[in-house]
Every structure is written in structure tokens, then in C-alpha cells.
Amino acid sequence: MMFAYLIVLLVSIGCLVAADYRYKLALFYQRRRAVKTLATAWTVFLAWDLAGVALGIFFPGQSRFSPNFHVLPNVALEELFFLLLFVYLTLLLWRGMERYADLHRS
């Protein structure tokens, strides 16, 4: 049960990859551009988290659903995957809405 949150994050990211593969929205449409976008957004949000930790705004949480393993000072391993999930979902939503708008333009 200790790794439940990490497993849920990884399964969710896997579902996003499957949807991306099915509809060719980002990584399976323009791989290089998508990777650059994901890496840039992920880095910005990680910097935001690190700044929040340094300023005492963000605190590491304790839960029986996640291990107490930090990859950076006060930044849990799960946070890195959560940020990836967040930016990948946002990119897929953007690309999906863009495609929807293109299909329904008169």
C-alpha cells in the first residue's frame, strides 16, 4: 500500500500515452516538439516547487500511500511524476481541443 500513489500516477501516465497513441496528439504526432514542450513545462513547474520549498510555502506530506523517499530536498519522487502527468495532460487537452476546433471550423 506504500506505493499506491506512485502506481496510480504511473497508470494514469500510461493511459495518457495510450490516448496519445490512439489519437496521435503529441508524442505520436510531433515527437521532438512534444518532448521539448513537456521538458520545458516540467522544468518550470519543478523550479516552482523548489522555490516554494525554499520559501517554506510547500511542505512534504506524510501518507501511508506513498513512501517517504525524496529525490531532492523535500521533493518526493511522486512529485516528479505528478508534474509529468500534469503537463502531459495539459498538452493532450490543448492538442485535442485544437484538433476538435479544426474539424468543426466552417
Image: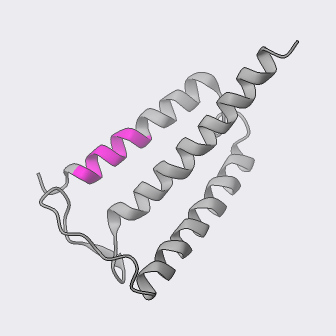
Give the color scheme: rainbow, by chain, secondary structure or one colour: one colour
Q: In the visual, does 43 lie left or right of 2?
A: right
Residue 51 lies left or right of residue 81; in this view the side is right
Q: Position of residue 22 (x, y in %)?
A: 56, 22
Q: List x then y, in percent, for residue 7.
A: 27, 47
**Residue 51 x %, y %:** 51, 81
Q: Is residue 25 above or below residue 87?
A: above
Establish if 80 lies above or below 16.
below
Q: Residue at x 60, y 35 (%)?
A: 93
User: In which quadrant will I find the C terminus?
Assistant: top right
> Residue 62: within the magenta?
no
- Check the image and name the residue furthest to the front: 57
* Residue located 63% across and 43% down the image: 91
Q: Residue furthest right?
A: 106
Magenta residues (range) = 5-13
Question: Image point 68% across, 47% down: which residue?
Answer: 34
Instruction: Looking at the picture, tell me which residue is in the foreground, 77 or 105.
Output: 105
Magenta stretch, main secondary structure class = helix
Q: Residue 16, image x and y in percent?
A: 48, 36
> Left or right of 59: which side holds 91?
right
Q: Is residue 53 above or below residue 49?
A: below
How many numbered badges does the structure rendering display? 0
Q: Quadrant of residue 38?
A: bottom right
Q: Is residue 11 magenta?
A: yes
Residue at position x 43%, y 42% from top?
13
